[in-house]
C-alpha cells in the first residue's frame, strides 16, 4: 500500500471511480497555503462523514431496540447494541452529573455525548489495519475543540450575562486592587483561548502516535506481536475520549457555576 494511503481511499475509488474522485477535489476548496485540496488532505473529512453516518445508523438501531418497552425493561444476557449504548451514555452522564448536578448535566449532555460518540468511533477506526482515524488529523480535532470552545462560552454568557466577562478579571476587592484585576484579565482570556488548542493537540498527537506505532509493528512483524500494541491502542483510544469529555465538562461547569450558585442561594434563602 503506498505511503499515506488507506483502504478507505481504495474503497471510494471502487465506489466512485478514481477519475470522478480526483475531478471533484476542487469542491473541497483550497488549503491555507492557497493550494488545491488533494485527496490526502480531504480524506480525514471524508472519514469524519463516514463516522457520522455510522453513528446515525447505530442511533437508529439503538432507538428501535429501546422503543420496544417489553424488551428494554430487562437487560440483555450478553453484550448487545442496547447494553453498549446504555453503559456508554450512562458513564458520561454520571461523570457530568457528579460535576454539575443532574439538572445541568441533562441540559448540556447533548454536546458532550456527541463529542464522546464521534471521538470514540473515530479512535476505534484506527485499530483497523490500513485505516487512518480522523482524530489523528489536527483539522478534525481542532473542529471538535472549537465546538466545545464556542459552546461553553455561549453557555457562560447565556447563564451569567456580562458577569461571565467580568469573572475573567478575578474577584473585585476594591479600587486599590484594580491593577491586579487588569493584569489577571488578559491572562485569563489567554488561558481560555488556549483550551481548544490543548484539547485538539492532545487528542491528535496521542492518536497519531498510536496509529503510527501500530502501522510500524504491523509492517515489521505482522503476526501476534501487534496484538499487545492493539490492546494498548484500545486503552489509549478510550482514555482520550474520557479526557476530552472530562475537560470539556469541566469547562462548561466553570462557565455556568456562577448562575447556578446564585440560583442555589436564592432557593436556600426562600426556604
Image (cartoon, grey):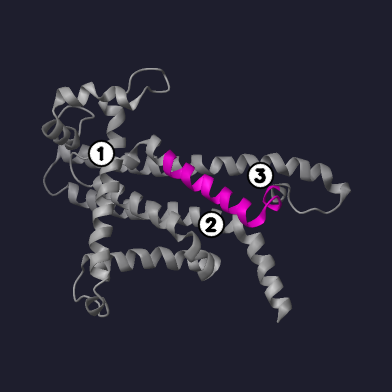
Q: Position of residue 203 (x, y in %)?
A: 40, 44
Q: Is residue 78 above or below residue 214?
A: below
The local secondary structure at tag 3 comes to helix
Check disc 1 and report the residue beneath it: 132
Q: Position of residue 135 (x, y in %)?
A: 34, 42
State the mark number for residue 250: 2
Q: Position of residue 167 (x, y in %)?
A: 70, 51
> Would residue 80 be counted in the magenta stretch?
no
Image check: 245 left or right of 149?
A: left
Magenta range is 142-165
For residue 40, which quarter of the picture?
A: top left
> Would residue 157 be counted in the magenta stretch?
yes
The local secondary structure at tag 2 comes to helix
For residue 270, which quarter of the picture?
A: bottom right
Q: Position of residue 11 (x, y in %)?
A: 14, 36
Residues under labels 2 and 3: Cα distance?
16 Å
Q: Nearer the viewer, residue 69 or 37?
A: 69
Image check: 109 left or right of 161?
A: left
Q: Is residue 62 visible?
A: yes
Crowd rating for badge 3 (residues with CA inside 10 Å; few <14, some 14–19, many 20+)? some
- Main SS of residues in magenta: helix
Amino acid at each position: 500500500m503506498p505511503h499515506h494511503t488507506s483502504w478507505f481511499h481504495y474503497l471510494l475509488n471502487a465506489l466512485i471511480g478514481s477519475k470522478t474522485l480526483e475531478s471533484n477535489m476542487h469542491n473541497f476548496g483550497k488549503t491555507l497555503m492557497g493550494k488545491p485540496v488533494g485527496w490526502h488532505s480531504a480524506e480525514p473529512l471524508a472519514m469524519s462523514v463516514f463516522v457520522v453516518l455510522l453513528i446515525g445508523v447505530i442511533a437508529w438501531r439503538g432507538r428501535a431496540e429501546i422503543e420496544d418497552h417489553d424488551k428494554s425493561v430487562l437487560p440483555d444476557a450478553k453484550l448487545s447494541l442496547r447494553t453498549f449504548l446504555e453503559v456508554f451514555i450512562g458513564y458520561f452522564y454520571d461523570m457530568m452529573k457528579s460535576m454539575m448536578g443532574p439538572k445541568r448535566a441533562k441540559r448540556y449532555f447533548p454536546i458532550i455525548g456527541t463529542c464522546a460518540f464521534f471521538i470514540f468511533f473515530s479512535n476505534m477506526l484506527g485499530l483497523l489495519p490500513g485505516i487512518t482515524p480522523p482524530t489523528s488529523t489536527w483539522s478534525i480535532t481542532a473542529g471538535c475543540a472549537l465546538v466545545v470552545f464556542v459552546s461553553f462560552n455561549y453557555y457562560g454568557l447565556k447563564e451569567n450575562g456580562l458577569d461571565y466577562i467580568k469573572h475573567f478579571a478575578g474577584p473585585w476587592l476594591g479600587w486599590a486592587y484594580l491593577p491586579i484585576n487588569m493584569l489577571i484579565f488578559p491572562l485569563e482570556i489567554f488561558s481560555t483561548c488556549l483550551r481548544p488548542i490543548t484539547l485538539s493537540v492532545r487528542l491528535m498527537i496521542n492518536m497519531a502516535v498510536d496509529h503510527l506505532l501500530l502501522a510500524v509493528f504491523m509492517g515489521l512483524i505482522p503476526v501476534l506481536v501487534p496484538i499487545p500494541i492493539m490492546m494498548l491502542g484500545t486503552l489509549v483510544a478510550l482514555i482520550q475520549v474520557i479526557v476530552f469529555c472530562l475537560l470539556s465538562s469541566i469547562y462548561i461547569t466553570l462557565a455556568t457555576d456562577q448562575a447556578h450558585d446564585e440560583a442555589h442561594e436564592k432557593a436556600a434563602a426562600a426556604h
